[in-house]
Amino acid sequence: MVMSLRVSELQVLLGYAGRNKHGRKHELLTKALHLLKAGCSPAVQMKIKELYRRRFPTKMVSPTDLSLPGLHSTTGGAPAGLPTSLTQLGFDGHGSPSLLPVALLGPKHELGLPHLPSALHPVHPDVKLQRLPFYDVLDELIKPTSLASDSSQRFQETCFAFALTPQQVQQISKSFGSLSHTFLKESQHIFFRFCLSETSCPQEDHFPPNLCVKVNGKPCNLPGYLPPTKNGVEPKRPSRPINITSLVRLSTTVPNTIVVSWTSEIGRSYSMAVYLVRQQSSSVLLQRLRSKGIRNPDHSRALIKEKLTADPDSEIATTSLRVSLLCPLGKMRLMIPCRALTCSHLQCFDATLYIQMNEKKPTWVCPVCDKKAPYEHLIIDGLFMEILSSCVDCDEIQFKEDGNWAPMRSKKVVQEVSASSNGIEDSCRSVVSDHRNSSSHGSSSKKVEVIDLTLDSSSDDDDDDDDDDNDEPPPKRACPSMSPTSPPVNKG
């Protein structure tokens, strides 16, 4: 109830209790929480009830046998009948603040609470978010919690709070560079994440419509809107974790507050969570992938035999399969061939390059089939590891029906093309030589001029000069043995 009070109401409460009422909101809130910890008088309790009734005058019901927030540490979640806005900040036995729910006590304390809707959202639903490959979760500062909404209003707003332990404050402080004020590698961050309230499987990040987040009164930067794909379609933000580390108070005595506002949707509910994570580099992820081991080559051989098995219903039978040893991402030779367990193709991509690209822009999409290839589904192919180690002078191989393979050497093709070109040139020269001999023996017959294509350009220029002196049209230069459809002579 104290967490829901505004600045003016906190000042009235502290002034009524004889405490200093000057300072910012988080300072006033800390003083009020310390007042509760020290044990307040019945008169102060009545003042809290009065201020709370003024805060929510239209939602009052008959007094309920509920108490003030518990002042001791508890491991369980808040009762199912309480909204998330009543999640409060208490103090553990050592005097450190900790996130505590409202506790149920005896009927001696009568406090008015807002009217609760019949269909309540659970405070801590059994929702799990998808794991972030480059971030290891160290602690859940706020467990996945439903964004409780009132169906009568379109625009909703909920407040959350959490506090840090001395060890967490120390580790996060070390993550900042002393001079550059930037995060170091393997640093610790605080992430704020949203998802749909679904329990069937781990959920992807999903923002509520018209989301706005304020951390300790400061607006949080959200991803920019994507351009709409169709006219009239409302633009959306790309959903991803929000790093709020720079807005968090690194203090063990001052709580951190988060105010979330969004637009409710019919038939959809959302959850939020706050995590303390440690950032990892691509080299660490590559090392973890190696530690998973290499997949047995027999798995790939079985896949080859399955693909090359003749289908009795098909008129076309595939007897071989050609696969490239170049990575489709960098067009370079594979070093660590891998693919996802969900992929049905044999073509692999390089694990190092794939992880490095997703470190800059996490998409986790297979570059071969354009399907999802998350990090946890990647596996190193043992058969391709054997092929790459034994075949070093070719970039393409051919698989056979029995699972064996053979290199496809492109150099032979180049040699065959070169040999065929030399054969065409030699045949043309032979034809020209035969015509020379025939013209020398038959001097009485009609003179036939033959152009020697093997002469250099200087001889051609001399012939041109002679033709100009005789003022005769130049003869047609063509090889007698070549038809109009013959390919051009390759002179090397």
Image: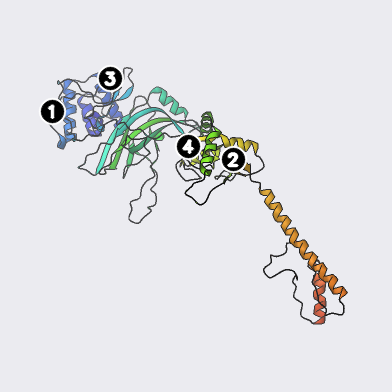
Q: How many angstroms separate mark 4 from mark 1 (CA)? A: 58 Å
Q: Which mark is residue 72?
A: 3
Q: Secondary structure at mark 2?
A: loop
Dot 2 or dot 3: first in sequence order is: 3
Locate residue 163 relative to residue 469 in the image: left or right. Answer: left
Which of the marked residues, 4 or 1, is nearer the chain's N terminus?
1
- Of the image marks 4 and 3, the number of the one nearer the N terminus: 3
Determine the residue located farthest toward the left in the rendered image: 62
Q: Earlier in the sequence, mark 4 or mark 2?
A: 2
Q: Position of residue 340 (x, y in %)?
A: 48, 38
Type of amino acid under label 1: Pro
Gap between marks 2 and 1 measured at Cα: 71 Å
- Picture coordinates of residue 358, whole percent (x, y): 49, 40
Amino acid type at image mark 3: His
Question: How many angstroms separate mark 4 from mark 2 (CA)?
Answer: 18 Å
The residues tagged by marks 1 and 3 sit, at their Cα atoms, a distance apart of: 24 Å
Is residue 163 placed above or below 366 in the rendered structure?
A: above
Instruction: Tell whether label 1 touches label 4 (CB within 8 Å).
Output: no
User: Which residue in the structure is indicated by mark 1?
Assistant: 63
Tell me the amino acid under the disc marked 2.
Leu
Q: Are marks 2 and 3 in contact (CB under 8 Å)?
A: no
From the image, tell me which residue sits under label 2. 334
Q: Which is in the foreground here, disc 4 or disc 3? A: 4
| Crowdedness near tag 2: few (<14), some (14–19) or many (≥20) residues, C-alpha within 10 Å | many
Quote the CA–CA distance across marks 4 and 3. 48 Å
Q: Which residue is mark 4?
A: 341
Foreground of the two, 45 or 70: 70
Please tell me which of labels 2 and 1 falls first in the chain. Answer: 1
| Foreground disc of the pair 4, 2 | 4
Disc sitting over residue 411 in the figure = none
